[in-house]
Image: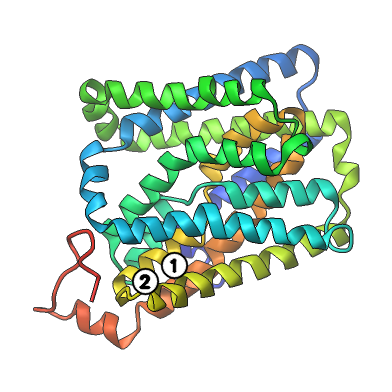
Amino acid sequence: MTRLRWPRWMPIDPYILLLLGTVGLAALLPARGTGADVSSGASTAAIAFLFFLYGARLSTREAVDGLRHWRLHVTVLACTFVVFPLLGLASRGLVPVFLTDPLYQGLLFLTLVPSTIQSSIAFTSIARGNVPAAICAGSFSSLVGIVVTPLLAAALLGGGGGFSADSVAGIVLQLLVPFVAGQLLRRWIGGFVARHKKVLGLVDRGSILLVVYTAFSQGMVQGIWHQVSPVRLAGLLAVQAVLLAVMLLLTWYGAKVLGFGRADRIAIQFAGSKKSLAAGLPMASVLFGAQASLAVLPLMLFHQMQLMVCAVIAKRRSHDPEAVTAAEPGAPGRTAVGSGRH
């Protein structure tokens, strides 16, 4: 939790600083010629290995247990893959006043990406919500997103994203096949993955940094960054702030209307209002190709914004009278999926 609160006055994730540093490196020393070919090949291999590890980590038993609380998971999936994309489509009306067409494409792609796992769990835990439900909800979202995100991107972005049968085949070969392979081999390698979780976590993040460097190098070489001005970036940030506020309010009060208790509402709010940088970056690299650098800019900005805002909300929720009462000795626990339902 310390990482999410650093520094105290502004919860900036240090990994975001590494991402920004990688973008700066790509701006100063972009990969060209043979170096670009090597970087692209290494990035492709890194993406495949990344999703292989995702498959090896996902516990089938946890997923089956999570089905007991299916209403919560359907709610999160609806927020992630229905409500978010609808808001993304509605933002089309902001072009060209607030957004350029390429930034809009990136914003729309952002709304199609699955939810996070780690930060959703962390914030749900801080707010004293239903942590097991957050774990399952994030896992389901990531699993569904491997298939649904590319399909939605092909349907909604169309020619703007350069999608074709080859794009779909690329998703299957680079993302879905390694994920399924990881699931099939989990019986034999699951223990090894669990024992070396920290080391493999570094591999995860290193792979994403490589993907970012490759994408932004291609953008620099092609000169697409001349399309983005400070005014446009400010407009993008304003639009994303509204998007995040709408989803946070909708997931919190919408869950209340649906009859969920406080602990479940917390899990729904944090899992249903956030987007995964770890899943989105590799997907964008496969789907957008040379245009990936501009496409992932909205996702990178939204990721940091959601961390900062949700850290504040989680801290305030932890001081709610209901949360304090639940934390007292002898109070009912939240150890089972769905136990937060009142």
Crowd around label 2: few <14 · some 14–19 · many ≥20 (10 Å): many
Q: Are marks 2 and 1 in contact (CB under 8 Å)?
A: yes
Query: Mark 2 is on which residue type?
Result: Arg
Q: Toward which corner of the image does residue 232 lie, by quadrant?
A: bottom right
Q: Is residue 116 left or right of residue 235?
A: left
Q: Toward which corner of the image does residue 3 lie, by quadrant?
A: bottom left
User: Does 148 sit above or below residue 38?
Assistant: below
The N terminus is located in which quarter? bottom left
Query: Mark 1 is on which residue type?
Result: Gln
| Residue beneath the point at 58% across and 37% down | 151
Q: Is residue 113 left or right of residue 107?
A: left
Residue 269 tag number:
1
Q: Position of residue 202 (x, y in %)?
A: 44, 35
| Residue beneath the point at 25% across and 51% down | 66
Residue 265 tag number:
2
User: Does 29 sit above or below residue 181?
Assistant: below
| Residue beneath the point at 52% across and 72% down | 250
> What separation in Å lies between label 2 and label 1 (alpha carbons)?
6 Å
Q: Can you see residue 12? A: no
User: Does 157 sit above or below residue 315?
Assistant: above
Q: Position of residue 29 (x, y in %)?
A: 78, 29
User: Does 252 sit above or below residue 82?
Assistant: below
